[in-house]
Image (tube, rainbow, N blue to C red):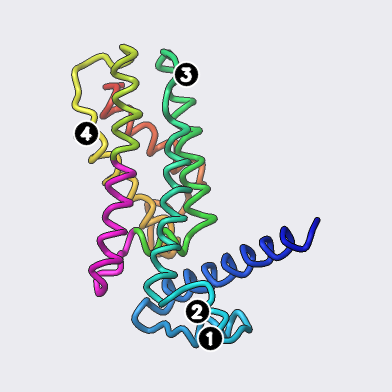
Amino acid sequence: MNIVVQADVRRQEREQQLIKIALELFATVGYENTKISDIVAQANVSQGTFYWYFKSKEAIALKMLESGRESILEAIAIGYRESKASIQESVVSSNHLFVHIFRFAEDNSYLMHILLKGIHSQPLLQQKVDGIKADMETAFANNIGRAKELGMLSRPIEPKMQAVFIMSLLEGVLSRWLFTERNANQAFADKSLQEIIEETVHFEFFGIFGV
């Protein structure tokens, strides 16, 4: 590996380190309560190093959100169908999709905290959060629209409206699963992740496929 490539790798690693630390702080102590000095202290770098990568705290938050947007849309995109499938095959496919989304949420709980709870004190950042949710909704609508094109639905539905319901369902379930103590949430107390996903998929199919 030559010197230029090594320097590029180190730069990317440092940038990701700063983003990871900022993300955790924004989620746990709040955007307003997080200072750049807090981020660099945890990263063990100088403030000058921070400003080499990001112009401001807002800039690192925007970068963080854009990176998260790309990852979560990739997760939803695996539900896009290339060919017609039976109901049974569709259940398996949707179960796989929701496993992927829930695992993503579990592995990226700080990002999900920000997406689900928002950054309402900062209009520009909240606009970005709202945009990510809108993009997720569009991705679900595209998946449903594709199923409709392939003649997989037994009744006429509006993909955009169904996507609203799926997003509402997903936001509610993920919020309670990620942010509520198990012993305080009786509905989830004795449920495994797979059981929660199966119930979510069943509810989704009842709404979309009528089964």
Most frequent secondary structure within the magenta stretch:
helix
Could you tell me the amino acid type at mark 1?
A: Gln
In the image, residue 52 above or below residue 82: below
Check disc 2 and report its element: helix, strand or loop: helix
Q: Amino acid at mark 4?
A: Lys
Sequence-wise, which precedes: disc 2 or disc 4?
2
Q: Secondary structure at mark 1?
A: helix
Residue density around tag 4, few if under 14, some if 14–19, many if 20 or more, within 10 Å: some
Name the residue at 30% across, 50% down.
133
Q: Which residues are magenta?
A: 116-137
Seen in the picture, residue 30 relative to 110 is either above or below; the reply is below
Using the image as rendered, state which of residue 157 and residue 210 is in the foreground: 157
Q: CA distance from mark 1 to mark 4?
A: 45 Å
Give neighbour class at mark 2: few <14, some 14-19, many 20+ (Cα, 10 Å): few
Question: Seen in the image, is 125 located left or right of residue 112?
Answer: left
Q: Secondary structure at mark 4?
A: helix
Q: Which mark is residue 51?
A: 2
The residue beneath circle 1 is: 47
Q: Is residue 104 magenta?
A: no
Residue drawn 29% across the image and 41% down it: 137
Question: Comparing marks 2 and 4, which lies closer to the viewer?
Answer: 2
Q: Is residue 151 left or right of residue 60?
A: left
| Above or below 52: residue 15 | above
The amino acid pointed to by label 3 is Glu
* Quadrant, the C terminus: top left
Image mark for residue 89 = 3
Measured Cα–Cα span from mark 2 to mark 1 = 6 Å
**Residue indicated by mark 4:** 160
Mark 2 belongs to which amino acid?
A: Tyr
Query: Picture quarter containing residue 118?
Result: bottom left
